[in-house]
Structure formats: structure tokens, C-alpha cells
Image: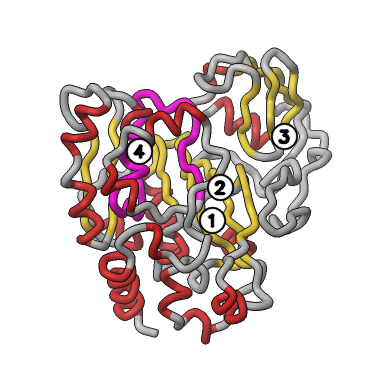
Amino acid sequence: MKLETVRENVQAYYGDVLQSSADLQTNACCMPDDVPAYVRNVLAKLHDDVMARYYGCGLIAPLDLKGMRILDLGCGAGRDVYALSALVGETGEVVGVDMTKAQLDVAMAHREFHAKAFGFAESNVTFHHGYIEKLDELDLEPGSFDIIVSNCVLNLATDKGAVLRGAHTLLREGGEMYFSDVYGDRRIPEALAKDQVLYGECLSGALYWNDFLNLAKAAGFTDPRAVTRRMLTIENPELEAKVAPLKFLSVTYRLFKLDGLEPACEDYGQAVTYKGSVEHAKGEFALDEGHVMTTGQRFEVCGNTYRMLKQSRFARHFEFDGDFSVHNGIFAGCGGNSPFDGLSEGGASGGSCCG
């Protein structure tokens, strides 16, 4: 199928076919149940038109966002843009990019509504009409974003590698791409990839999880980390029969742009101690599903985790012990298993130490 045809189909599906989340035919694009109370409080302030057109598959609200500059790839009608705009505060900024004008029209119509709802003197959000595979064609300065988010959109992109490379270019050193998407337990057969409904429902455009990891590493994100994951059950008998025996997973990943990250988790005898100073995470801080650090307790880490904390916005929240002068081999406990391991249908799991 030609790239132009795929894009036209996606624009038609999200601009014309879907008028609200109630029109979705599967459960791939739905709000996770475990949304923190402070995020729910923000979402309660969003305009009904924006909330009705939510098609994400995860929560893309990382911690410690005050004053951050964030880019949302495939922002749609702006639900995540506006939620994040409240969390970054008046000193922060959120930029949204989407290729579907009908969705952007809804988003842009409510800029002043949300500024007033959050008590801001003026709106701290802007929107761009364009393709996330061609971020270099937009008026966005390289190295100018602290965080890049995306919610169930990478699977719809016609060139996933280009999206990841563009994101890497736009991030500041120490910044991160924090995003949720759908992944398959194997590569999608070509016949299914041509199904317009399955593609629009975020299934037949999904990457095989290992292909994603390789694309992310090739783009410069050396050590992808899984934050949360849940099995998708689809719950549409007709579409379930079409995709069988494929299984799908919604995963939230964080990809740090950092020099010095190694391909494997190496042991240098390092440790960190969390100070408990991140808002909404006083008792413990979760870097990813394998690194949950309790306040005040020494936590042994690999070299990559040490860098992710020390060379990012999280540095001020930790005490650091050790350096890179002595190498002790591979860090015990880290592994490269499938993200599907240990999950039952509809369930979520912890996972191995890294990624």
C-alpha cells in the first residue's frame, strides 16, 4: 500500500469515521484504569469536546514536569497536550503535532478555555499541522525539548524509524521520549497491514516488539526502558478472529537521549539513594518497571541507570555513590526477555531489571 494511501486512510478514520472514543471497535485505544488522582483532577478540567476524542492507549504523564518544554507527537484533539500544559505550569510549554486537520481544529478551538481553567494568564500550548515522520520540515528547533510524548500514534506512522530519529534530534541532551504504543508478539502479516479498520484501531500497524527495540537503538536511544505494560484483549470477536494468533501489548517506554549509555547493563559498583523530593512520589520513585526506589534506601544500579538519573532532570532528587573507575562485568538481574513474558490477558506485570 502506498504511503499516501495509508496516511489518507488514517486521516479519514480519525477525522471522519471516529467522532468520539465510543466509535472505536476494539479496546486498544482506551484510558488505563490506574490513573493517579492528581492526573484525574487535571483531566476533570478539560473541555468535553477534547475528552471525547481521546484515542490513546496509556498514560504519558511522567513525573517532575514543572517548567518543562514538551512535544506531543500525534496530539489529535489535544487531550494530552492540555493535561500536560497544566502539569508543566505557566513557566512550561507544550507543543502538539498532528496530520489530521479535523482533530487539530478541535484542539486549537479550546486554547483559551484551558488557560482559564488552569488559571494561566495566557495559553502555554501551540499546535503544528504536519507529519511526525517529517519533523525536520516543521518550525521546531533541534535540541529544544526536555520531553517528547506520544500516545498510541507510532503504530500509525508510515516510517517509524524516521519518527524516532526526529525525536532524538529534537530532544535536549538528558531529555527523554516518554510514550505509549501497541506492540505485537510477532511481525504483522502484510494482508492484515492493509486492513483499514485494523490499522485505524492501532493493531495492524503495530511493530513487533523486538523490531521496535532495534529501531530505537538505531535512532540513538541505546537503552529503552519499559515503564508499564498491559495485554490488550481487543474484545471484538470479528477482529479477534482476523488477527489470531497474534497477541498485542500496550507498553509505555522511556527513551533517554544520553551520551555514554552502553548496549548492556554494566556493573560499576554504583548505587543511588532517592531523597523523596519528586512531587507525587514522596515514598518511592519508579524510573521504570524494574527500578522502583524507596525514599532513603540505598539502591544498587547499573551504569546506564546511574547516568539516566545523574544526567537528567532527576539528578537533584538523588544522592549518588560511585563512579566508572572499576568495572565488575554485567549487572546481575538485567535481562532481555520478551515484554510479553509473565503477562496474562488483561494483566500487567513488573518485569526484569532493565527494559
- Mark 1 vs mark 4: in front: 4
Q: Is 14 on the left-hand or right-hand side of 28? A: left
Q: Secondary structure at mark 2?
A: strand
Q: CA distance from mark 3 to mark 4?
A: 28 Å
Residue contact between numbered discs 3 and 4, judged by CB atoms under 8 Å: no
Q: Closer to the N terminus: mark 4 or mark 2? A: 4
User: Who's the residue at 35% across and 62% down the image?
Assistant: 133
Q: Secondary structure at mark 3?
A: loop
Amino acid under label 1? Ala
Residue at mark 2:
253
In-front residue for pair 333/54: 54
Residue 143: give x, y in percent of width and height. Answer: 35, 40
Residue at mark 3:
302
Q: Which mark is residue 70?
A: 4
In-front residue for pair 95/228: 228
Q: Closer to the N terminus: mark 2 or mark 1? A: 1
Within-10-Å neighbours for mark 1: few <14, some 14–19, many 20+: many
Amino acid under label 4? Ile
Residue at mark 1:
216
Start-end of magenta stretch: 58-85
**Residue 65 painted magenta:** yes
Q: CA distance from mark 2 to mark 1?
A: 10 Å
Q: CA distance from mark 1 to mark 3?
A: 20 Å
Q: Closer to the N terminus: mark 2 or mark 3? A: 2
User: Who's the residue at 63% across and 52% down the image?
Assistant: 230
Within-10-Å neighbours for mark 4: few <14, some 14–19, many 20+: many
Q: Closer to the N terminus: mark 1 or mark 4? A: 4
Amino acid under label 2? Tyr
- Mark 2 vs mark 3: in front: 2
Amino acid under label 3? Cys
Q: Is 149 on the left-hand or right-hand side of 209? A: left
